[in-house]
Image: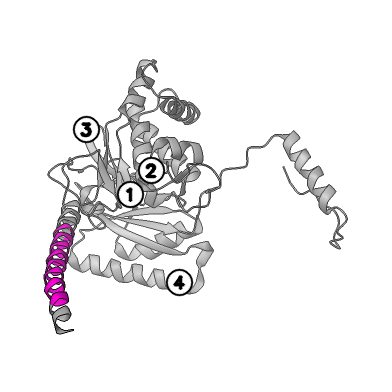
Amino acid sequence: MKEKTKSVLGIAVPVLMVLVLLLNAVMLYKIGNMDERLSNALNESEDVAQENGVIIGGEYEIKATTNISDAYKSGSTSGLSDKDKETLDMASAVLDEIVEDGMSDFEKELAVYDWMTRNLEFDSGSLLVVPNTQADCDNPYGVLKYHNAVCVGYATTFRLFMQMLDIDCMVVHDSDLCHSWDLVKLDGDWYHTDIYSDSGSGNYAHFNLNDSAQMSSWNWNTDFFPAAEGYKYNNAYMNRIECEDIYALPASLREALDNMQSVAAFSFGQEIGDSEAQIVSAMMESVVSVLDSTGYNGAQYMEWNWLQTDDGYVLCVYIYGFEPDEPGVDLTDDEYEKIEQAISSAFGDIDSGEEDEPYFED
């Protein structure tokens, strides 16, 4: 019996030693791979000195679409895939609808911004019944076909429109690769425009900002992307009003709220230093408190920032709650009549206790 035990142990011990060595090798391999994955993740968080071929949020890629814009400008679609041809047709139809002869580059950009903020939605899975909605929410094809987009979709679609209109535009990504927006060049100056952040409100809070304003929210590779120093086409600056002094601000804000303005801007007949800026900040906080407690005129809350110009500082105020008009349902009279008949047939026997009224009003 002892001889058999020795024989078994003589075989088992070497086998166990081999297994231990194999397990150690596997663990070292896994640790090596983990270190490599960690290194790759850290590298992905660093500034990337390129515009296209960048992955945002670990899932959505910024892709060039110059083949489509070039086809639009040349009038030749040879070489385009069927998907790109459809994208071109959809984008062309939008521009035909919103761009008029004689428009300046700024007016064209504004028309595109207004159309996109009113007609596109964040990708939220609400259109999963439509094939490929989420698969294409990061590129112009899916954005224009399904009106459903993530930030990359907004940015690449806006850039496509700009390039079709011969306006210089770049897609910018933040240093952590979690967000993207656009840089657009107007009259020699670059501006940041982030339509994704304004979608649904359309209040121009992220429209044509300079670096200083954009840096309050994001960081990016400023060595690679051009500096945005313009303010001439910032919507708030263009519509600013002059206040006699900082203490005239509350009355001017009340007027903006009464008029249901989504954006208001104020310059002052005095120099703005640290002391004046603190007073303005205290007044703005008080106005926000009033809105929080009363919801005055439908306003929900405010954001504000200072815009530095050659003439001094301009206070830019963005008011949320004054939503733009929703795009109407584009149905024909015949379609409305058929809907009316179908609903009446299904629910006409239900007594509401009120006089019959049409389901749809002109």
Q: Quick one: 280 or 12, which is closer to the camera?
A: 12
Left or right of residue 269, residue 160 in this image: right
Name the mark nearer the viewer: 2 or 3.
Answer: 2
Which residue in the protein does label 2 denote?
A: 138
Q: Give the CA separation, mark 1 to mark 2.
A: 9 Å
Scheme of image coloration: one colour
Where does label 3 land, which residue? 188
Assess disc 3: are there few (<14), some (14-19) or many (≥20) residues with their C-alpha within 10 Å of its C-alpha: few
Contact check, label 1 and label 2, Cβ < 8 Å: yes
Crowding at dot 1, Cα within 10 Å, few <14 / some 14-19 / many 20+, comes out as few
Q: Where does label 1 land, which residue? A: 59
Q: Which element carries disc 2, helix, strand or loop?
A: loop
- Cα gap from disc 4 to disc 2, whole angstroms: 36 Å
Amino acid type, label 3: Gly
Mark 3 vs mark 4, CA separation in Å:
41 Å
Sequence-first disc among 1 and 4: 1
Residue pointed to by mark 4: 292
Q: Nearer the viewer, residue 73 or 49?
A: 49
Query: Which quarter of the picture shows residue 143?
Result: top left
